[in-house]
Image (spheres, grey):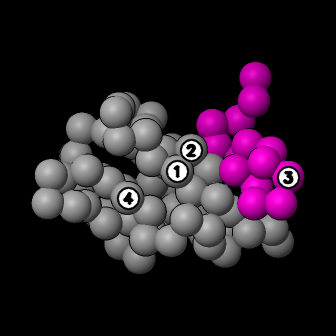
């Protein structure tokens, strides 16, 4: 986990459950419409952010390596 991550939330899919904010409070925030946003578009790898992406009930969070675009989560299948 040495590369920076690009974190994206598909707000067309996000249901505003707030689970990402609970799991990774420094990694995500909810706006006035209860839509999730990453706190920063790029960040250092974080187990909490990864857990938030894995735990999103609608799989609205994607994480990619910043330099290559290679998926971290969800993994390519």
Q: Is label 4 in contact with label 2 (beta carbons under 8 Å)?
A: no
Dot placed on the residue nearer the N-terminal end, 2 or 3: 2
- Image location of residue 9, percent across then percent down: 45, 47
Q: Nearer the viewer, residue 21 or 69?
A: 69
Q: Is residue 70 above or below residue 45?
A: above
How far apart, in angstroms, are the residues tagged by discs 2 and 1?
Answer: 5 Å
In this orientation, does residue 75 appear? yes
Q: Is label 2 in contact with label 1 (beta carbons under 8 Å)?
A: yes
How far apart, in angstroms, are the residues tagged by discs 4 and 1?
Answer: 8 Å
Dot placed on the residue nearer the N-terminal end, 4 or 1: 1
**How many numbered discs sit on the rendered protein?**
4
Question: Residue 69 vs residue 18: left or right?
Answer: right
- Image location of residue 54, percent across then percent down: 51, 44
Identified at 25% across, 61% down, the residue is 30
Dot placed on the residue nearer the N-terminal end, 4 or 3: 4
| Location of residue 45 by image quarter | bottom right
Local SS, label 2: strand
Q: Which residue is mark 3?
A: 68
| Quadrant of the snapshot with the C terminus | top right
- Residues in magenta, as a range: 64-77
Q: Which residue is mark 1?
A: 8
- Of badges 4 and 2, nearer the viewer stands 4
| Quadrant of the snapshot with the N terminus | bottom right
Q: Which residue is mark 4?
A: 37
């Amino acid at each position: 986990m040495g590369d920076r991550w690009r974190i994206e939330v598909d707000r067309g899919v996000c249901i505003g459950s707030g689970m990402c904010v609970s799991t990774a409070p420094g990694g995500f925030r909810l706006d006035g419409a209860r839509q999730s946003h990453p706190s920063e578009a790029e960040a250092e790898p974080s187990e909490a952010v990864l857990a938030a992406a894995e735990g999103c009930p609608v799989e609205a969070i994607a994480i990619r390596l910043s330099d290559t675009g290679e998926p971290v989560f969800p993994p390519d299948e």
